[in-house]
Image: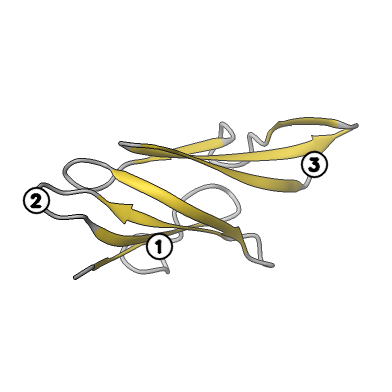
Amino acid sequence: MKLLKVLLVSVFLQMLLLAVTANAGEVVLDTTFNGNGYSVQSFGSMGSVAESVAVAPDGKVLLGGWTIAPAVYGDFLALRFLESGSLDTSFGTGGIVTSHIG
């Protein structure tokens, strides 16, 4: 099976990244991605919001969004995953980049 699509579901306090494949016309979770076909991530003292996701030609997955903290709107957040679903530790710090907004 080949990675067909990465879907992003953003819930107020957590981000859910789903990897799906097509096999004989059926779309299913790709369990080679993180061992279960999905990754749940949460950042910031009050959570995080995912805004976008892209799959690079090399299969790495880039997720962008922002974190939520008391009294501030948040910080920019980017995560990069390997095709296997684990965070890419060569990107930022442990696969994560944050930058203060404002």
Q: Is 70 left or right of 88, judged from the image as shown? A: left
Picture colour scheme: secondary structure
x and y, in percent, of residue 46 in the image: 19, 40
Along the viewing direction, whichever of 84 and 69 lies nearer the viewer: 69
Judged from the image, the secondary structure of the residue bearing numbered disc 3 is loop
**Residue at (9% x, 51% y) in the render:** 71
**Which label sits on residue 89?**
1
Q: Is 96 left or right of 75, judged from the image as shown? A: right
**Residue at (77% x, 47% y) in the render:** 2
Q: Where the N terminus falls, by quadrant?
A: top right
Outermost residue, right side = 24
Between the residue at mark 3 and the residue at mark 1, the CA separation in whole angstroms equals: 25 Å
Between the residue at mark 2 and the residue at mark 3, the CA separation in whole angstroms equals: 46 Å
Which of the two labelled residues, at mark 2 and mark 1, occupies the earlier sequence position? 2
Mark 2 = which residue?
Answer: 71
Circle 3/circle 1 CB separation < 8 Å: no
x and y, in percent, of residue 93 in the image: 31, 65
Q: Amino acid at mark 1?
A: Thr
x and y, in percent, of residue 73 in the image: 20, 55
Numbered disc in front, either 2 or 3: 2
Which of the two labelled residues, at mark 2 and mark 3, occupies the earlier sequence position? 3
Quadrant assignment, res 83: bottom right
Mark 3 = which residue?
Answer: 1
Circle 2/circle 1 CB separation < 8 Å: no
Q: Amino acid at mark 2?
A: Ala
